[in-house]
Structures are given as structure tokens and as C-alpha cells.
Image (tube, rainbow, N blue to C red):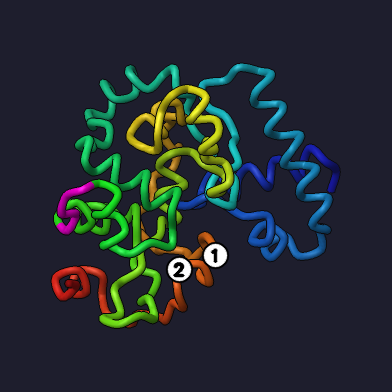
């Protein structure tokens, strides 16, 4: 099998995948193709899609690769598919930004930064699968600890958390972590929208700086209502 055939095969796998397809998963499917070779082929494919200015591109996002429409076409795609972009209130975007930059973080720490109760906003973000409960802080009361999800990375077109604008970048623009933090992130639509909402755990921040975190087996919706 030559490179053209391998690229076509990889394209097929990415096209039918409901979520971004990782290099490891591609290697698992293909079997005998080395990881470095897969990475080389993916890199060439990304370049090819960028050069040819097609209606969609191949991007690395959320730990894998996914076909996405170009952001500049979003207005016309919304007209065809008749869906509205994710609507976030300023409070939700501000809370999400705080979780993204300060995770792992507990509700009391979020409320201290915002100065208002965040229970309802956290519930909304949990329902939208943009944040998740990653455990409990090993302090009196054992408050719930929050972090962002795989869907957060997919929604904002991020390869990983380190792809977020740095605090230094934001300060140079005179903007604190808030809804402005995500204003320049890619607004693209995945070619294949996921039908399942499987969450993939990812590490976030340094738990040691926030107290020990223990696993939390209770469902997200149940936990939130029981938190002080």
C-alpha cells in the first residue's frame, strides 16, 4: 500500500468517526503502520487541505483529528442546518473561563472570584458537558472539584488545554479570563456530529496545589444539589 492509499484509508476512518480520532486509535485499527508514519501522513493531509482551500479542513482537536468546516462559512451552514450557535450568558462564559484556567477548582473558589452564587451556572455547564466533576477536595466538607471536558476542547476547537490563550497573552490585550478569552477561538462545525456523548478523562492542573482530590462516583446532577 502506497502513501496515497494510506492517506485515503486514514481519511475514511476520520470521516466516519463520531469524535476526533487519535493517532493511537488509527494505529490500533491499521495494525502494522508505525506511529511516526501515521503522524507524518496526518501532517501531510492537514497541509494538503489547507493548501487546496476546500470547504472543510482537517484539524487536530481534543487529542485527535477531525474534519471541520471552515469558520468563515459558519453563517451559511447555520442557514442550511437551521441550528443556532451555542448561546452562553456572560455569567456562563465567565464561569467556564475560570474553570478552564484555574482547574481543578471548587465552587467556593469560583464564587470568590466572581463574587456571586454559581450553583445554577455550574449546573448548566455540567448539563452541556463542558465541565465535569473530577473528584472531591480532601478538606473539611469535601467540596466537589470541577474541570473541563473533552467536549469543551471540541467545542472551542482546542487541541489541548495548553492551546488556550495564556494569561500573559490576555493581559497584553487588557482582558482578564472571561468570555473574551474564547472570542477568537475557531467557530467550526464538525463534519460528523457525534451521536454519543462519551466523556474522556483528562488531567488538568496540579491537584497538589488544591488539596488531594478523590474520585467521585455520584452522578453530576445529584452531586451539585448536595454541595454546600
The residue under the point 66% across, 18% down is: 52
- Residue 111 relative to residue 133: left or right: left
The quarter of the image holding the C terminus is bottom left
Q: Which residues are magenta?
A: 115-119
The residue under the point 19% across, 72% down is: 227
Q: In front here: 71 or 172?
A: 172
The residue under the point 40% across, 63% down is: 198
- Is 152 situated above or below 224? above
Q: Quadrant of residue 131?
A: bottom left
Between the residue at mark 2 and the residue at mark 1, the CA separation in whole angstroms equals: 7 Å
Q: Is residue 118 magenta?
A: yes
- Residue 4 relative to residue 61: left or right: right
Residue on which disc 2 sits: 210
Q: Residues within 10 Å of mark 2 (few under 14, many from 20)?
A: some
Q: Residue 130: image x %, image y %?
A: 34, 52
Q: Residue 128: image x %, image y %?
A: 26, 52
Residue on which disc 1 sits: 206
Q: Is residue 72 magenta?
A: no
- The mark found on residue 176 in the picture is none
- Residue 102 relative to residue 217: left or right: right
Q: Quadrant of residue 122?
A: bottom left
Q: Residue 40: image x %, image y %?
A: 80, 43
- Is 202 situated above or below 212? above
Q: Secondary structure at mark 2?
A: helix
Q: Secondary structure at mark 1?
A: loop
- Is 76 situated above or below 225? above
The residue under the point 64% across, 61% down is: 25
Is mark 2 in CB contact (under 8 Å) with mark 1? yes
Q: Residue 221: image x %, image y %?
A: 19, 69
Q: In front here: 79 or 163?
A: 163
Amino acid at each position: 500500500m502506497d502513501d496515497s492509499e494510506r492517506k485515503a484509508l486514514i481519511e475514511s476512518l476520520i470521516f466516519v468517526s463520531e469524535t476526533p480520532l487519535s493517532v493511537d486509535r488509527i494505529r490500533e485499527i491499521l495494525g502494522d503502520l508505525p506511529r511516526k508514519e501515521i503522524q507524518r501522513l496526518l501532517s501531510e493531509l492537514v497541509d494538503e487541505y489547507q493548501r487546496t482551500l476546500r470547504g472543510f479542513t482537517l484539524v487536530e482537536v481534543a487529542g485527535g483529528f477531525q474534519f471541520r468546516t471552515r469558520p468563515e462559512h459558519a453563517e451559511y451552514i447555520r442557514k442550511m442546518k437551521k441550528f443556532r450557535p451555542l448561546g452562553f450568558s456572560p455569567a456562563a462564559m465567565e464561569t467556564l473561563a475560570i474553570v478552564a484556567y484555574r482547574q481543578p477548582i471548587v465552587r467556593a473558589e469560583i464564587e470568590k472570584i466572581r463574587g456571586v452564587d454559581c450553583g445554577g451556572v455550574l449546573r448548566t455547564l455540567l448539563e452541556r458537558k463542558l465541565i465535569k466533576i473530577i473528584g472531591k477536595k480532601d478538606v473539611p466538607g469535601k467540596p466537589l472539584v470541577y474541570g473541563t471536558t473533552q467536549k469543551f476542547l471540541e467545542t472551542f476547537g482546542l487541541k489541548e488545554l495548553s492551546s488556550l490563550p495564556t494569561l500573559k497573552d490576555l493581559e497584553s490585550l487588557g482582558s482578564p479570563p472571561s468570555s473574551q478569552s474564547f472570542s477568537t477561538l475557531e467557530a467550526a462545525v464538525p463534519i460528523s456530529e457525534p451521536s454519543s456523548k462519551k466523556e474522556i478523562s483528562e488531567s488538568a492542573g496540579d491537584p497538589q496545589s488544591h488539596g488531594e482530590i478523590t474520585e467521585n462516583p455520584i452522578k453530576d446532577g445529584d452531586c451539585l444539589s448536595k454541595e454546600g
